[in-house]
Amino acid sequence: MSKGINSLLQKKKKGERIVSLTAYDCPTARLEEDAGIDFILVGDSIAMAVFGEETTLTADMDVMIAHTRAVRRGAPGTLVIGDMPFGSYECSDPQAVMNAARFLSEGGADAVKLEGGNSRIVSRVRAIIDSGIPVMGHVGLLPQSIRRTGGYKVIYSDMKESLFREALALQEAGVFAMVIEGVEEKLAGQLTEELAVPTIGIGAGRFTDGQILVVSDMLGMSGAFRPKFLKVYANLGSEISRALSEYAEEVRGGLFPLEEHVYHAREDK
Ligand code: KIV
């Protein structure tokens, strides 16, 4: 049984910082559970991190559900949140409820996340929560809206009014926590103080209640992608490259497999 959504609120109340990461597969989710990560987001960042796309816009429901299921298998005891992909909640409240329900019934998620806080999104959030599904909000830089906003633009204090209005409307609608992405540190800190629900920052500075990173970015598997907010904790990309080259060299040089790697007929044992 995974931890519930209330565990995040408890942490905020106790002043304990919330630690989260994305995951897209079972082995990574298992490692994250072993490391005691507080919640795992199966992000629509999968489109870029796993499928090599330019944006998150091409993630679709079937892909998200399959990967959520894999993450759930790897992390049965961790809060798992499915990220609703672009196009899965734009049309209507019933469409949003139907797709959110798939994350729980087919993917095994505990909750879903939606981007944005305008009146249309608030209506979707209310409808999903009304159907018994917990929702995490997401304000600030919204990667699913880059075609409208013209790119990945950090939110500064000139946008304070709309940022706070949307975040408060989401809280009022009943979200249990909120991602704050790409926001000037001071503003994200003020918003965190204003909100009763926990805030989870990415590129939002030090004063949010928790932090989230894309797991492949922080493990050094995203090549030259090094935004200012990212800290790379391991260089798995170069370690994997080294192992692949060594394998290729050994196979070509007749150094793999060796005697210790082969099966012989039973009588030879
Ligand atoms: O898709 C994702 O990985 C996200 C995080 C950046 C919060 O939404």
Image: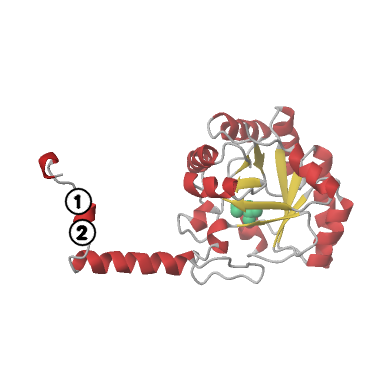
Residue at disc 1, secondary structure: loop
Q: Which mark is residue 47?
A: none
Residue at disc 2, secondary structure: loop
Residue wearing tag 1: 262
The residue drawn where x is 62% and y is 35% is 100
Using the rendered view, name the quadrant where residue 234 is placed: bottom right
- Residue 43, can we see it? no
Specify the amino acid type for callout 1.
Val
Of the 4 image quadrants, the one containing the N terminus is top right
Residue wearing tag 2: 258
Using the rendered view, name the quadrant where residue 252 is placed: bottom left
- Residue 126 screen position, x and y as percent: 75, 35
Mark 2 to mark 1 CA distance (whole Å): 7 Å
Q: Of 162 and 128, which appears nearest the observer?
A: 128
- Residue 262 screen position, x and y as percent: 19, 51
Specify the amino acid type for callout 2.
Leu
Q: Of 59 and 18, which appears nearest the observer?
A: 18
Packing grade of label 1 (10 A; few <14, some 14-19, many >=20) is few
Type of colouring: secondary structure
The residue drawn where x is 59% and y is 45% is 33
Instruction: Tell me whether the residue at label 2 lies in contact with that at label 1, contact meaning CB atoms closer than 8 angstroms.
Output: yes
